[in-house]
Image (cartoon, rainbow, N blue to C red):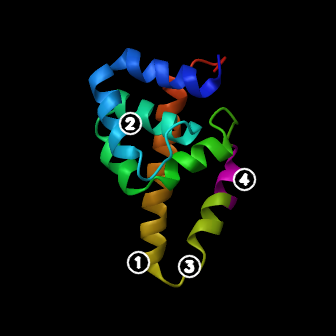
Amino acid sequence: MQRRTRITALAQAIDPERATSASTRLAPALPRGSTAHAVAVLLSAAYPALGPVLEASPEIARALVDDGTLAARDRASLAMRIGARVGDVDDLDHVRSELRRAARDERIRIALRELLPPAL
């Protein structure tokens, strides 16, 4: 069974109604049948508060699929990722905003790691 299919089945097992609803709401931003769509549906089914976040920022699900969720994060690589994201440190409002987004994205990545079995 494909990874995407197993992720979708896990979302249905958690909460079929929420998974179906999330699938419909996320379809305009993330094509059905894509792994990013399946990941977003799973997160929305398991953590209802994440549904609106993923609808507003579907790039989070795409990044989770592209970057992988099982790769360990060491301090140096995380600092580099955040530094690249923040860019110009002279704009404090931008720095704060990007730090909040980076923290949000990392929490979502951790939530997904908690949901997915190691073999998936």
**Pointer 2 residue:** 23
Q: Residue at x 70, y 44 (%)?
A: 74
**Pointer 1 residue:** 93
Give the Cα separation between the discs numbered 2 and 4: 36 Å
Provide the residue span drawn in magenta. Answer: 74-80
Q: What percent of the width, then of the height, locates residue 102?
A: 51, 56
Does residue 21 appear to the left or right of 28 in the view shown? Answer: left
**Main SS of residues in magenta:** helix
Q: Which mark is residue 89?
A: 3
Of badges 2 and 3, nearer the viewer stands 2
Instruction: Give the number of callouts.
Output: 4
Asked if disc 2 and disc 4 are in contact, CB closer than 8 Å, the reply is no
Q: Which mark is residue 76?
A: 4
Crowding near the residue tagged with mark 4, few <14, some 14–19, many ≥20 C-alpha atoms within 10 Å? few
Name the foreground residue: 56 vs 94: 56
Q: What percent of the width, then of the height, locates residue 32?
A: 49, 39
What secondary structure is marked by label 4?
Answer: helix
Residue 14 occupies quadrant: top left
Give the Cα separation between the discs numbered 2 and 3: 38 Å
Q: Which mark is residue 36?
A: none
Of badges 2 and 4, nearer the viewer stands 2
Query: Which residue type carries mark 4?
Result: Ala
> Which quadrant of the rendered structure holds the C terminus?
top right
Q: What percent of the width, then of the height, locates residue 8?
A: 48, 25
Give the Cα separation between the discs numbered 3 and 4: 18 Å
Q: Residue at x 42, y 68 (%)?
A: 97
What secondary structure is marked by label 3?
Answer: loop
